[in-house]
């Protein structure tokens, strides 16, 4: 490594030198704010009587050993920006928009912008940015500008300031001569550019996590190989993910490594994962590209099958991004012919129903990350999952309990009946009403109609009761208003002006664009009645809820677990189960899917607690059991809440949990053979 202070233009000169921005670098992303600051600094140099101005460091790697082609490891934003200023000066002189200075024009063009003696036109322009930026930079030379590029936008900014004649061209050029950098030159065989790159960007302030991953994958390859891999794989991955590669990689790692990386730790987890697996770079890029193709379909809701496209669009409206890792795996199952395209649609539809039923039933959402992270692992634990993937998937999802449960008919119905629909998050409220309206009808973009003011979400019984409404609801108007105001039965879509929302029900029926004239399914029942009573609200709610049960179905699984009797045990067993994986347990003729011994322990104790709460709480004073329970939540990580002021200590090993369950069953006078479990 060699570091040398020099003038920026001294770094740029030499007729045969090229500056290559490696493909593992991010695109040029300086905005007008940074460009204005740099140009203002250059103008200030003139006012300061041409004092030097330090710009920072440029780290370059001499891959060819002669310094003719320099890979820019750090400093590409500054290098590209100053090159754009020089190009803008040259073009302003060439176009005659500033007083002619032909000697300066030739000097800038031949010494700083092009390789004068290069016969290879592809190497003529000295600066070679990353793919799209390179096309934009070269197009300025060729008078065919790419308008959607930062390169072009910033070039025009500099051009306009130059032809505004704030300072003369000679003054501007002389000021640029005063720009100072530290040129840090790395040599092949002596310095490791990857380590230097990581050190320079260790703060993570400038680079996306995906930028660091790209560097890690490509940097150790030759320049030519980098170009090939970037062109054939990485650039396509960027396009597929809408240039949100960091999020894609986070979902990819969640799927592969069964843990969810922090957003600012994606690179470190990715590096650890690749090194641990010793994965070949080329094979890795092939796989990443394949999964990015799936990702493209998922995030853009695009599929050859309209049913799948529509389902993905609705799932994305619900912003169910936590399911993306599982979706990637399901798409891979289809790729491997383990499931059909129709089964793919069924799985996506079940996930849509699962997520929305949980929302309506107020099931906490924080469990979904873990659910979708481990769902494929749960499915894969069944020996015949490849032959029965869809049925195993449904069986596993329906076996979830607690905060991961799939709300059943009763829970979903109760949620729809009582939930405050009007004040829920906008996307969920719109999704609910749009789906109820469009299901088995000609579809309308309800969201767009609301945005443009054609439709609005309104209360039938208004938020403020007028004397006419109080009379219509009789003496019980206050209770009815408080109970039903924001619920599904009283919420609809209308085309009327909301300033008339306090009108009586009869007036709302007969006025233009109101209930009698509405073509919406949501208002069909309203046109058939003449008053709005508690019974009418309940009847309309029931109509809508029956429709909801058709839309958000509860799946049925025909899967029967093929059990190996040698892996089935009861709690009377004297075997040690440390290191074994439990997948199911049974009690009182009910089977429960389970993911861990902790879950088994917790849910058995909860089942027994419901049988006799007083007996269970007496264990707090039982000499042999008092160390299994606590009255206060002191060790949050190692406790499971059974009830208020009653916690089960779960931070013990498997055999200790089994011993505790046996002892507790004995206190309940229950034979341990009545509790069975199945391991994998």
Image (cartoon, helix red, strand yellow):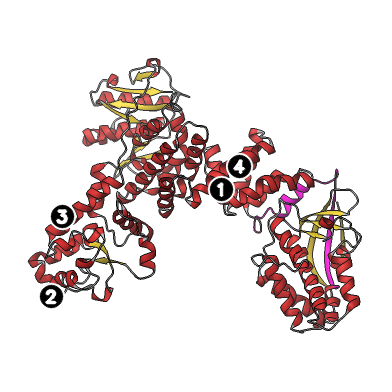
Circles 1 and 2: CB atoms closer than 8 Å: no
Q: Earlier in the sequence, mark 4 or mark 1?
A: 1
Q: CA distance from mark 3 to mark 2?
A: 24 Å
Q: CA distance from mark 3 to mark 4?
A: 52 Å
* In the displayed structure image, the side of residue 125 where residue 532 appears, left or right: left
Residue at the spot of label 1: 248
Q: CA distance from mark 1 to mark 2?
A: 57 Å
Residue at the spot of label 2: 467
- Where does the image place residue 594, in percent across and percent down from the top left? 38, 31
Regarding mark 4 in the picture, which secondary structure is present there? helix
- Where does the image place residue 182, in percent across and percent down from the top left? 83, 62
Which portion, as a residue range, is magenta? 177-205
In front: 233, or 244? 233
Category of crowding for the residue at label 1, using alpha-carbon neighbours closer than 10 angstroms: few (below 14), some (14–19), many (at least 20): many
Q: Earlier in the sequence, mark 1 or mark 2?
A: 1
Q: CA distance from mark 2 to mark 4?
A: 65 Å
- Where does the image place residue 172, in percent across and percent down from the top left? 82, 78
Residue at the spot of label 3: 539
Circles 3 and 1: CB atoms closer than 8 Å: no
Residue at the spot of label 4: 288
In front: 461, or 74? 461
Q: Earlier in the sequence, mark 3 or mark 1?
A: 1
Residue 456 included in the magenta stretch of the image: no
Q: Earlier in the sequence, mark 3 or mark 4?
A: 4
Regarding mark 2 in the picture, which secondary structure is present there? helix
Q: CA distance from mark 4 to mark 1?
A: 9 Å
Give the label, 3 or 2, closer to the camera.
Answer: 3
Q: Quadrant of residue 629?
A: top left
* Residue under the point 30% across and 34% down: 556
Category of crowding for the residue at label 4, using alpha-carbon neighbours closer than 10 angstroms: few (below 14), some (14–19), many (at least 20): some
């Amino acid at each position: 490594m060699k570091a040398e202070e020099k003038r920026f233009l001294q770094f740029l000169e030499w007729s045969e030198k090229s500056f290559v921005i490696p493909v593992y670098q991010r695109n040029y992303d300086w905005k007008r704010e940074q460009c204005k600051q740099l140009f203002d600094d250059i103008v200030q140099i003139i006012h300061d009587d041409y004092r030097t101005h330090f710009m920072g460091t440029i780290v370059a790697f001499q891959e060819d050993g002669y310094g003719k082609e320099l890979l820019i490891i750090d400093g590409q934003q500054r290098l590209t920006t100053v090159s754009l200023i020089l190009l803008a000066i040259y073009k302003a002189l060439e176009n005659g928009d500033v007083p002619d200075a032909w000697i300066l024009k030739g000097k800038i063009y031949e010494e700083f912008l092009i390789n004068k003696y290069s016969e290879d036109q592809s190497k003529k322009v000295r600066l070679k940015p990353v793919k799209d930026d390179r096309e934009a930079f070269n197009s300025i030379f060729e008078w065919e500008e790419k308008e959607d590029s930062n390169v072009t936008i910033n070039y025009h900014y500099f051009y306009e300031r130059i032809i505004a004649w704030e300072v003369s061209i000679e003054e501007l050029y002389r000021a640029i001569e005063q720009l100072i950098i530290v040129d840090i030159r790395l040599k092949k065989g002596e310095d490791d550019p990857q380590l230097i790159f990581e050190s320079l960007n260790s703060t993570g302030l400038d680079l996306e996590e995906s930028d660091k991953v790209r560097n890690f994958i490509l940097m150790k390859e030759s320049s030519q190989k980098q170009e090939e891999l970037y062109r054939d794989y990485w650039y396509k991955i960027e396009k597929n993910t809408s240039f949100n590669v960091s999020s894609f990689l986070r979902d990819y790692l969640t799927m592969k490594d069964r843990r969810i990386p922090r957003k600012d730790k994606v690179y470190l987890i990715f590096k650890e994962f690749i090194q641990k697996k010793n994965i070949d770079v080329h094979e890795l890029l092939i796989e990443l590209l394949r999964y990015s193709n799936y990702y493209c379909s998922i995030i853009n809701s695009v599929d050859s099958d309209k049913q799948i496209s529509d389902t993905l669009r609705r799932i994305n409206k619900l912003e169910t991004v936590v399911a993306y890792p599982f979706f990637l795996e399901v798409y891979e199952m289809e790729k491997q012919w383990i499931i059909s395209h129709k089964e793919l649609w069924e799985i996506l539809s079940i996930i849509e129903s699962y997520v929305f039923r949980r929302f309506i039933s107020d099931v906490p959402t924080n469990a979904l990350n873990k659910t979708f992270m481990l769902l494929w692992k749960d499915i894969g634990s069944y020996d015949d999952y490849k032959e029965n993937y869809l049925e195993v998937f449904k069986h596993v999802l329906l076996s979830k309990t607690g905060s991961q449960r799939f709300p059943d008919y009763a829970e979903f119905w109760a949620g729809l009946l009582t939930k405050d629909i009007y004040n829920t998050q906008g996307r969920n409220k719109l999704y609910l009403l749009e789906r109820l309206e469009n299901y088995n009808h000609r579809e309308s973009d309800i969201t767009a109609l609301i945005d443009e003011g054609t439709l609005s979400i309104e209360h039938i019984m208004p938020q403020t009761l007028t004397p006419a409404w109080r009379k219509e609801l009789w003496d019980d108007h206050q209770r009815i208003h408080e109970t039903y105001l924001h619920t599904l039965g009283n919420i609809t879509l209308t085309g009327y002006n909301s300033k008339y929302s306090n009108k009586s029900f009869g007036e709302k029926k007969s006025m233009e664009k109101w209930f009698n004239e509405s073509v919406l399914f949501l208002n069909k029942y309203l046109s058939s009645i003449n008053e709005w009573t508690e019974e009418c609200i309940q009847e309309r709610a029931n109509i809508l809820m029956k429709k909801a049960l058709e839309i958000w179905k509860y799946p049925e699984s025909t899967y029967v677990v093929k059990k190996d009797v040698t892996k089935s045990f009861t709690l009377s067993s004297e075997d040690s189960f440390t290191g074994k994986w439990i997948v199911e347990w049974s009690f009182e003729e009910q089977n429960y899917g389970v993911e861990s011994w902790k879950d088994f322990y917790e849910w058995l104790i909860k089942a027994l607690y419901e049988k006799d709460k007083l007996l269970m709480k007496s264990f707090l004073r039982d000499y042999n059991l008092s160390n299994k329970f606590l009255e206060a939540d002191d060790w949050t990580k190692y406790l499971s809440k059974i009830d208020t002021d009653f916690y089960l200590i779960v931070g013990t090993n498997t055999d200790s949990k089994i011993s505790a369950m046996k002892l507790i069953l004995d206190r309940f006078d229950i034979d341990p053979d009545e509790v069975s479990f199945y391991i994998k």
